[in-house]
Image (cartoon, rainbow, N blue to C red):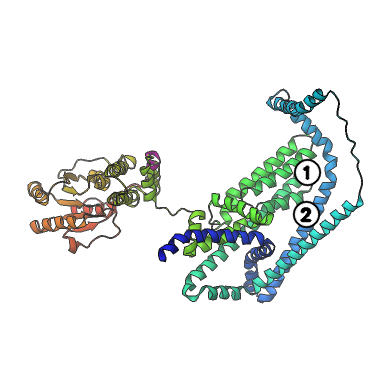
Amino acid sequence: MEALQLQLAPLIRLATVFLTVAMLSMGREFFIPLALAALFAFLLKPVVSFFNHKLHFTRSLAVVTVTILSFSVLGALIWGLGVQLHELAKDLPGYRNTMHQRMLAFRQVGEGGVLERLQSLVTEISNAPASQEREAFGVEKEETPVLIEKSTSRLEEGAMSAVGYIADSLGIAAVVIVFVIFMLLRQQDVRNRVIHLVGYSRLTTTTRALDEAASRVSRYLLMQTLINSVYGLLLALGFWAIGLPYMILWGAMAAILRFVPYIGPWIAAILPLALSLAVFDGWTQPLLVLTLITSLELLTNMILEPMLYGQSAGVSDLSLLVAIVFWTWVWGPVGLLLATPLTVCLVVFAKYIPELRFIEILMGEKSEVQPALLVYQRLLVGDIEEAEQFVRESAKDIGQEKTVDTVLLPAAVHARREMLAGRLTKEESKEILDTLATLSSDSIMDESLAPSFVAKRPLVLCRSFDTAADAIALRWLSQTLAPSGVQWESIPNSALVSEVIAQVEELKPDMVCISAMPPGVSSTAQLLCKRLRHRFPELKILLARWGARRVEATTDTGASWVVSTTESARERFQDAFHLEKTDLPAE
């Protein structure tokens, strides 16, 4: 039964998604007013809090005052836009001569060019069937006279449809206003009911999700409204200085359309630029309009938005574009304006709900893939150039030693784990490990770290269990400590315990480094440490479990120190040999 449920789980999720989309599409008349009311509630929430706490209004008085003022301003703005749109529609025929001259100028530029030849070719092809038909019958087709009748019924129908549209819009607006007032008044009650519905066992998760969604959406909407208002005001003043008519219309439309990411600013720029070409005879004013729009966009994107946004919307650029297309397809123009806040809420809740985790992974702003896995994935497909570039950037950002410990060593551990699990062949694993070893030295090693002459060089005898994997850390460590005069000798990984003891007796090293990268070989490494400790009680032994999440205690291994990073190993060497402690360069 459980196996059947696991098999049907993906189908159930897919069916749930399709059912949700169908409900949103078919119930748009019900969901759109609710979504608009929630949008305005998020937008007005900080303003209501300001009236309530700073100006000491009661909660009810603050909600009613802010709602009436906001929708009054919005209604006046819509009325002004309607008036200017009506005036623009009446004045457009007066610009016919200028538009005709512009078309002639563009046509003269294209005379004799590819565009004109293509146009003539299309005309010939489209007229060919009619001429062939007339030649075949030998007669000319009679033209059927077209009767133009003026009907007042059509005008009446148009007027009635316009009145019906206005009435529907006013009805929706009234419903939205009522919902906004009650959402702001009953905010705490709605929150408590949602918590009770979800269950008190998820109280912490639900509270964090609601708080993050509310704060992020409110901040986004408030800052975006402020930025767009400043943008629209500056644009209207600039158009007034240039002499472009209907400046209020273009400023308001630019402020509204900028709520639509990426697409809105382009639409807001095209309309006034096209009007400037129709209104003005020369090219000076259209160029000034284009310069003004470009300058304001640069000012907004590079100064205002980074300064006023404390945090981004939290959605990746590509996911936001997909969301815009989806919500526009489901709810039309209203969905276009609601796409960003709705997507932000969805991503925030998906972050706290395990069943919706895939949405947060696909649409979240930052990828949670570990850098080590990215390097391993690039090497797995043979893209050494991109892996090397990533390692270099990481060394520049967090330093060389941190890159070895947090990127290269975990990537090597993952390669060993995949090889032991049978998902990688030994040859593939060795190739990846050899490349990682090369990256650990050649790609990020600072050339200034060159060996210097030291009278007495301490000897370190190294025994590794996997030459290719352990070389990543050992090569970096030996090159890092080379300026201090540390001498390195390696014992083959095929050497037995007795052979290692014999080498220690012969060379008398100052320290023995046993390198054993996980997974595996833990018991073998501990056995070697204990045998060395029993035979040489005063010997300094360093057991390196490179990239391990948890290391064994020294009492369990017989080693003097147990480390998992090159940083801690370097510190142990410096303490043991009294070397000068210097910080590695970050670049």
Relative placement, left or right, of 526 versus 568 is left
Report which residue position mark 1 lands on: 243
Q: How many marks?
A: 2
Residue placed at 62% from the left, 55% from the top?
Answer: 327
> Residue most toward the front?
137
Query: For residue 288: magenta?
Result: no
Q: Nearer the viewer, residue 25 or 447?
A: 25
Q: Residue at x 89, y 38 (%)?
A: 146
According to the picture, the residue beneath numbered tag 2 turns out to be 81
Rendered location of residue 544, percent (x, y):
23, 54
Question: Where does the image place residue 379, in percent across and percent down from the top left?
Answer: 36, 43
Horizontal side of residue 46 vs 409, given as left or right: right
Give the residues in magenta: 384-388
In the picture, residue 59 is in which quadrant? bottom right
| Residue ID at (48%, 72%) | 202
For label 2, the SS is: helix
Query: Does residue 222 appear in the picture of this structure?
Result: no
Percent position of residue 261, x then y: 61, 51
The vertical placement of 308 against 204, above or below, is above
Asked whether 376 or 228 is in front, the reply is: 376
* Amino acid type, callout 2: Leu
Left or right of residue 207, residue 262 in this image? right
For the residues bearing labels 2 and 1, Cβ distance under 8 angstroms: no
Question: Mark 1 Cα within 10 Å, few/some/many (few <14, many 20+)?
Answer: some
* Kind of residue at disc 1: Gly
Q: CA distance from mark 2 to mark 1?
A: 18 Å
The residue lying at 48 percent from left, 71 percent from top is 204
Nearest the viewer among 573 and 405 is 405
Label 2 CA crowd tier, 10 Å (few <14, some 14–19, many 20+): some
Between circles 2 and 1, the one closer to the viewer is 2
